[in-house]
Amino acid sequence: MIHSAPPSRAATLKIFDVHIHFPRNWEKPNEDPAPLVERLAEIATSAGITKGCVLTGGRFGPSYERGIEILSQYPDLFVPVAVIDPEVIGRDEVLELHEMGYRGLKLIGVARPYDEPDYLAAYAAAERLGMPILFHMGVIGGGIDYSITHQRRDPKAAAMFQRMQGMRDRNPMRDVSANRMSPVHLDTIAQRFPDLRIIGAHLGNQGNYEYATSVARWRPNVALDMSGGETIERHAVELQLIGHEIGIEKLVFGSDCGMDDIREHIDRFEAIYEELQLSEADRERLWWRNGAEIYGFEEPILAEE
């Protein structure tokens, strides 16, 4: 059942979600994803999302061509973002993706560090084309958050564990290193490409908060998304990351969860903003304006005396 957004939010706020994964039926990976995207659009709109970046292609999901074909049916809601492997996607391929209709890029699970010199041509092309890049930061999450639950005491976690075990043969493990996806690499990229709009996911992720806050503190073109689930949200409050260690203008909202959990995710952030006693102007920035400025839907305005 799809719930309508609370009247107060629907009436006063717009939401820009920078981190939505293209929906996929993991049990039937070859199934046409178009009906899932239609359902995603209904759920996102009901939850109050005005614009959402849908991360498309790469290792999982449809081809870039099929992805853009589906997403083009929702031009007012979805912003197509291409998931790329910089080992095979360079300057020319980024140009092709832009011509297809993609308006941003996403990187995750890279074979070499993000600031590898061979990757710079792709970043240069993105900078020139005005395509923001979302970088996954740190450890890649799995289906079970063991800081919260465990399959030996939670039936839902047990079912997820069995599902994950069953998919291992279909999705063999990759050569993945969290060290290659450290926020410290964003400093190199940000200084080399000062007009490239960069988003580091998950506030840098656990173990990386200090690096992430340091890069965001000094590089004007680096923002951080606040996705990553309840543990990272708890850390954001306990470590005073929102508005203290990281300025409000440097943060964007991202759901990065299953479509059925988007509404709950938004509700949790509303509670966080209430707990932090943020002003309406700060909330508007976090929900909408920061992300909209990064993707060109709002014009940044400098302060005046």
Image (spheres, grey):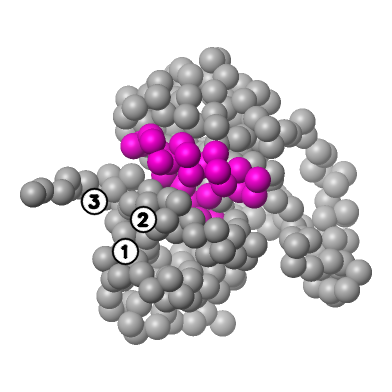
Read off the residue under disc 3: 298
Q: What amino acid type is highlighted by mark number 2? A: Ile
**Dot 2: what SS?**
helix
Where residue 296 sits in the image (x, y, percent)? 27, 45
10 Å neighbourhood of mark 1: few (<14), some, or many (≥20)?
some
Q: Residue 6 is drawn in which quadrant?
A: bottom left
In magenta segment, residue 185: no
Q: Position of residue 248 (x, y in %)?
A: 36, 55
Question: Under tag 3, what secondary structure?
Answer: loop
User: Mark 2: few, some, or many residues within 10 Å (few <14, many ≥20)?
Assistant: some
Q: Residue at 47% x, 29% y: name it.
A: 187
Q: Report whether residue 83 is seen.
A: no
Q: Which mark is residue 138?
A: none
Label 2 or label 1, whichever comes before in sequence order: 2
Task: Name the residue rendered at 52%, 73% in the picture.
Answer: 268
Dot 1 falls on a residue whose secondary structure is helix
Dot 2 and dot 1 residues touching (CB under 8 Å): yes
Question: 266 or 61: nearer the eye?
Answer: 266
Question: Which residue is label 1 attached to?
Answer: 282
- Gap in angstroms between the C-alphas marked 1 and 3: 16 Å
